[in-house]
């Protein structure tokens, strides 16, 4: 028997006056997966999460989260979800253990259960050595682990993470994602927003957002394989001039320099992109050109307005 989706959203929009922050959001997120919102600041990621958690009411559309109608049943939903914001939101003047105890009591955990869960969280997120340290003296990585421990103190079925790794280094980001996969393996559904391409590739499924709309969605690998462009990398001495000339062509979606190479996205209707480039630019006859594997960044620029910027 197939489990009901963790999140269903149909035609959800959110307007603030004349400004539309989210436009016709459609989601069907299975349980036990990590689903990502990828997009720049202002693309509607945070607003979408606030709509799904019941913190905002939609201007139109229907939302069901874990079987609850949102925002009508948002209060009942609160005990079933965890929410970790981009900005650290716990108490600097409390210790690690005091923060966990306070959040646990907010979620209504009884004293015996709370004591057990605090001990488990301290061990799981490597906070035991600093359990009596005040938060104000902790590093960014330690605060991140504490935030995740607090957001999951009540063992939520669904976890919302709004750009949770924006203030930590790459090593802490990698460790953080390992912890997310551990949670997912135990049955927790996770929805995470990010603007990091490497993080987005880790998600089971992904929605690419721009200007409040989903431009593409699916498994990251599937999105890369189904791109409407070919990717060509060019090794050539005068890349800045070549880039400007390429971007003037209708067939070229994007051109970006990566070290000594130029990475060019060319429309799929150009059947032989390397031969086409050499015909348009005879100076490339002696240059090194090769077809490259698409990346998620290529997908992003091919479906959003950034390709020709």
Image: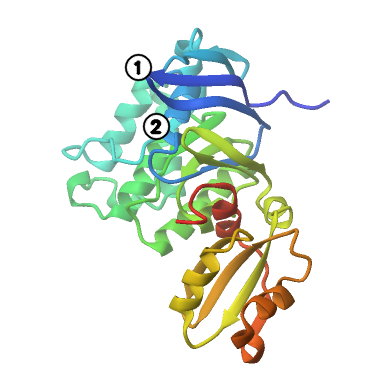
Quadrant assignment for the C terminus: bottom left
Q: Which mark is residue 17?
A: 1
Q: Are marks 1 and 2 in contact (CB under 8 Å)?
A: no
- The extreme right residue here reads 1
Which quadrant of the figure has residue 17? Answer: top left
In the image, taking residue 306 as reference, residue 205 lies left or right, namely right
Q: Earlier in the sequence, mark 1 or mark 2?
A: 1
Q: Residue at x 64, y 40 (%)?
A: 33
Relative placement, left or right, of 221 versus 199 is: right
Horizontal side of 147 relative to 98 (left or right) equals right
Which numbered dot is residue 115? 2
Tag nearer the camera, 1 or 2? 1
Q: In the image, is residue 163 above or below residue 157?
A: below
Residue at (46%, 48%) from the top-left corner? 124
CA gap between label 1 and label 2 equals: 46 Å
Where is residue 137 drawn, in percent x and y?
18, 51
């Amino acid at each position: 028997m197939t489990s009901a989706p963790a999140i269903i959203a149909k035609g959800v929009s959110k307007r603030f006056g004349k400004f539309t922050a989210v436009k016709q959001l459609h989601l069907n997120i299975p349980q036990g997966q990590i689903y990502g919102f990828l997009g720049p600041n202002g693309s509607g990621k945070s607003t979408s999460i606030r709509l799904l958690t019941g913190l905002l009411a939609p201007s139109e559309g229907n939302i069901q989260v874990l079987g609850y109608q949102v925002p009508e049943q948002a209060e009942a939903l609160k005990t079933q979800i965890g929410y970790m914001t981009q900005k650290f939101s716990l108490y600097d003047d409390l210790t690690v253990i005091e923060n966990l105890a306070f959040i646990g009591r907010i979620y209504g955990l009884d004293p015996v259960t709370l004591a057990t869960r605090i001990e488990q969280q301290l061990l799981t997120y490597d906070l035991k050595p600093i359990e009596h340290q005040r938060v104000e003296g902790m590093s960014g990585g330690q605060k991140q682990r504490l935030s995740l421990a607090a957001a999951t103190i009540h063992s939520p079925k669904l976890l919302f993470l709004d750009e949770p790794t924006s203030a930590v280094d790459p090593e802490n980001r990698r460790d953080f994602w390992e912890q997310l996969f551990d949670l997912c393996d135990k049955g927790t559904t996770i929805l995470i927003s990010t603007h990091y391409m490497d993080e987005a590739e880790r998600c089971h499924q992904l929605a690419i957002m721009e200007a409040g709309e989903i431009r593409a969605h699916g498994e990251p690998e599937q999105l890369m394989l189904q791109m409407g462009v070919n990717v060509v990398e060019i090794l050539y001495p005068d890349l800045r001039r070549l880039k400007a000339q390429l971007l003037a062509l209708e067939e070229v979606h994007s051109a970006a320099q990566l070290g000594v190479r130029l990475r060019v996205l060319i429309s799929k209707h150009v059947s032989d992109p390397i031969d086409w480039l050499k015909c348009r630019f005879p100076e490339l006859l002696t240059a090194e050109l090769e077809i490259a594997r698409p990346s998620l960044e290529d997908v992003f620029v091919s479906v959003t307005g950034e390709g020709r910027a």
